Amino acid sequence: MGLYRLVYYSVASDTLSLEDVKEISRKASLNNAKRAISGALLFCEGKFLQTLEGGIHEVNYTLSRIMQDSRHKDIKLLEFKRIAKRAFRGWDMSLVFFATAREFQAEYSKYSAVREFDPLALEPESCVELLHELVEKNKRNPLTMSAA
Ligand code: FAD
């Protein structure tokens, strides 16, 4: 069966806390491991950017659950495509979070013409590369991440 990747962007509900986001990520990791899904989730300035990769049925099913979740809104599907290989192998759901995009400006400015965190202004491929860079950075030095 082919491997697929999705990328979407959404806005957190007004009441969502960083602890809630960590809980979403913990539960997502468990679910994704069961379905052989890998991926990453970025939370910044009350916005989510997520990529998921895996089998078409598993990714579609997970997307349908995510779309119904009231903990976020304004969900914009940026990409759903077949891919040759995983970028996040070994990561059921890697969470990275920043209070503002200034905290990852060095990485972000490579892909964006503007300073504000606006995933809609990025190429889907750039979203995945940015997420990958941030996950790798987090792996090397988790203490650089600050709470929202
Ligand atoms: P359940 O046992 O049904 O729910 C677990 C707990 O989560 C519930 O007790 C409740 O507190 C809370 N919850 C569940 N659904 C909702 C809801 N619609 N509204 C408010 N609270 C709710 N799931 C994944 O499996 N993989 C992912 O990669 C993933 N990424 C997510 C990214 C974001 C930004 C968000 C907001 C959610 C994500 N989720 C993900 C969660 C997904 O939307 C579903 O909540 C989850 O898949 C339900 O799994 P479950 O049936 O095992 O959990």
Image (tube, rainbow, N blue to C red):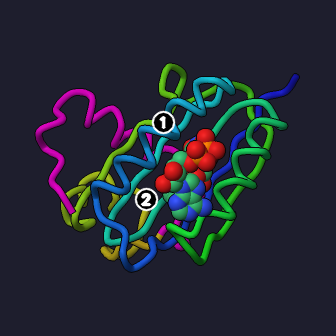
Q: From the image, which quarter does the C terminus lie in?
A: bottom left
Give yes or no for residue 132 being in the magenta stretch: yes
**Residue under the image location 70 percent in, 41 percent down:** 5
* Main secondary-structure element of the magenta-colored stretch: helix
Q: From the image, which quarter does the N terminus lie in?
A: top right
Q: Is residue 6 left or right of residue 116?
A: right
Whether 61 is drawn above or below 72: the answer is above
Please state the extent of the stretch shown in magenta in the rendering: 119-148
Q: Is residue 84 left or right of residue 94?
A: right
Residue 111 is labelled as: 2
Place of residue 92 in the rendered image (x, y in percent of width and height, measured from the top left): 52, 29
Give yes or no for residue 89 being in the magenta stretch: no
Place of residue 131 in the rendered image (x, y in percent of width and height, measured from the top left): 43, 46
- Residue 126 seen in the current view: no
Does dot 1 land on a helix, a strand or a loop?
Answer: loop
Mark 2 vs 1, N-terminal side: 1
- Are there few (<14), some (14-19), or many (20+) residues within 10 Å of tag 1? many
Mark 2 close to ligand 1, CB under 8 Å: no
